[in-house]
Structures are given as C-alpha cells and as structure tokens.
Image (tube, rainbow, N blue to C red):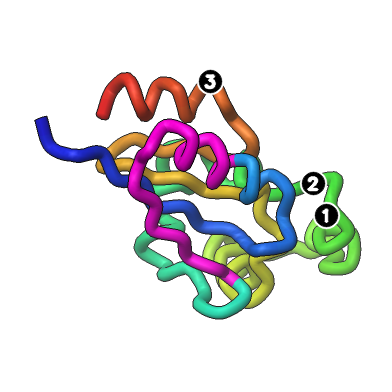
Amino acid sequence: MSELQVQVFGTRKSKETRAAERFFKERKIKIHFVDLKERPIAKGELSRFVQKFGLNALLDLEGKAYERSNLAYLRTTEDGVIARIIDDPELLRLPLVRAGKHLTVGEDPDGWKALVAGG
C-alpha cells in the first residue's frame, strides 16, 4: 500500500484549513500545504473541484469576501467567477483537500475520514 498524501489548499488564517491540517497530522498523513495567499490555485486544479461539486458549492456565500465581491449581483460566466476565485482565494469555502481522485471542500471531517479510509 502506498503512503497516503493529501494536498490541502487554504490560507494560514483560515480556521477550517488549520482544522484539516490538524486532522491529517494527527493521523500521521503527509500533507502538501498550498497557501493560496502566496500561490494562487491553478485553473486546472480548481476545475477538478468545480466538476465534482459545482461552482456554487465552492463559494463561501456567507463570507465577507463574497459580500465585497458583489458576485451575487454580477452577471458573469463560470470562467469569470473562476478568475475571481484565483485572484481572491477568500471567496472559497476552505480548505480544498485532494488525495488522488478524492476531493473535499470546506471543513468536512467525514469527507476527510473517507479520504483516509479510501487512500
């Protein structure tokens, strides 16, 4: 069995991202952390999450960044929204977690457990 590794996309100040890091560290699972404040998520990477969950599931609709962005009122394409997300990761429900083909969005301990079990 190969050693499970997870990729965690988030920001240092996101408590949900820290919760994901703690969850995987407690289980001695290797984490590759991508700080979206330092390095924006690649469009192809983001597209995987969009394909699985849909764009609205990725957006933090209650967050201040979403409110500031006026996305609720703008008529824009999915590509337009994706471009905004890449520019402003705070629009996302963090963290985005990937282990191989398994993906989770937001604080999702049940999803993380499934990643560990399925890894």
In the picture of the structure, the residue carrying the numbered disc 2 is 61
In the displayed structure image, the side of residue 85 where residue 110 appears, left or right = left
Circles 2 and 3: CB distance less than 8 Å? no
Element class at badge 2: loop
Real-space Cα separation, disc 1 to disc 3, in angstroms: 29 Å
Compared with 116, 88 (above or below) is below
The residue mark sitting in front, 2 or 3, is 3
Toward the viewer: 1 or 93? 1
In the picture of the structure, the residue carrying the numbered disc 3 is 110
Q: Residue 63 location, x and y as percent? A: 84, 52
Q: Residue 72 location, x and y as percent? A: 83, 54
Residue at horizontal 13%, vertical 37%? 2
Compared with 77, 108 (above or below) is above
Which amino acid does the dot numbered 1 rest on? Answer: Ala
Q: Is residue 33 magenta?
A: yes
Earlier residue among tags 1 and 2? 2
Q: Residue 49 location, x and y as percent? A: 45, 47
Which amino acid does the dot numbered 3 rest on? Answer: Asp
The 10 Å Cα crowd at callout 2, few under 14, some 14 to 19, many 20 or more, is some
Real-space Cα separation, disc 2 to disc 3, in angstroms: 21 Å
Residue at horizontal 38%, vertical 38%? 28
Which amino acid does the dot numbered 2 rest on? Answer: Leu
Q: Which residues are magenta?
A: 20-36
Toward the viewer: 113 or 40? 113
Query: Which quadrant of the view contains residue 52?
Result: top left
Q: Which mark is residue 72?
A: 1
Compared with 49, 35 (above or below) is below
In the displayed structure image, the side of residue 91 where residue 110 appears, left or right = left
Earlier residue among tags 1 and 3? 1
Element class at badge 1: loop
